[in-house]
Amino acid sequence: MRKINCIAVLLVTVLFACNDSATKREETQSKVDSSAKDTLKSVIEKKLTPDSSKTITATFVGFDLGDVSHYMFKDESGKTWDFRSDLDSTYKFEVELPKNKSNESNQGFGSNKALQGKSFIITYVLTADDEHPDEDGGKVKVITHVKAK
């Protein structure tokens, strides 16, 4: 009986330690993601000139997190636009999914269904993509400002 109690205590301790570790890992990842976004925003803002940003009007199609973030929009002519980052925090195009919907391919994030189908005026810049230099000619589109249409 004593061995069973010891094993039970050990199992409970391990479970709490694992859960606590996962929570700390998620908090750390969130801080890293936020810091990376702030750094990218700072670098882009320093490089902005009146001619460097462009504006489009487009409808939000969806968000996908694969190897990188994909903020998908479709403009009035039917062209699909894939933005790698959204530096404007006015709208949350991506949402954290419940644990039962989270998997390796979506990494716990999905599209904000409430914003899908809505039109926005999007200001964006092209910036170097150091992580995927062979894609898109080494340049990616990054949203710098979003306004509802």
Image (cartoon, helix red, strand yellow):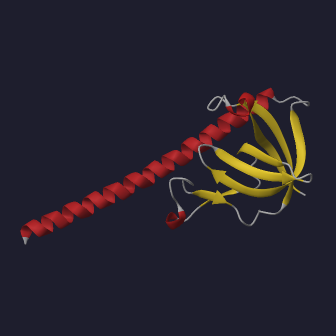
**Residue toward you, 77 or 115:** 77
**Residue sitting at x 66%, y 28%:** 133
Res 113 quadrant in image: bottom right
Tell me if I can see residue 113 in this picture.
yes
**Residue sitting at x 62%, y 43%:** 68
**Residue sitting at x 72%, y 57%:** 62
Is 49 rendered above or below residue 54?
above
| Left or right: 99 as drawn, with respect to 73 | left
| Residue 41 picture location, percent across and down | 72, 37
Q: What count of labels does the image hold?
A: 0
Res 14 quadrant in image: bottom left
| Residue 29 picture location, percent across and down | 52, 46
In the image, farthest residue toward the bottom: 1
**Residue sitting at x 30%, y 60%:** 15
Tell me if I can see residue 87 in this picture.
no
| Left or right: 31 as drawn, with respect to 145 | left
Is 111 rendered above or below residue 69?
below
| Left or right: 4 as drawn, with respect to 48 | left
| Residue 115 picture location, percent across and down | 77, 63
Q: For the C terminus, which image quadrant?
A: bottom right
Q: For the N terminus, which image quadrant?
A: bottom left
| Residue 53 picture location, percent across and down | 86, 35
Is 141 rendered above or below residue 130?
below
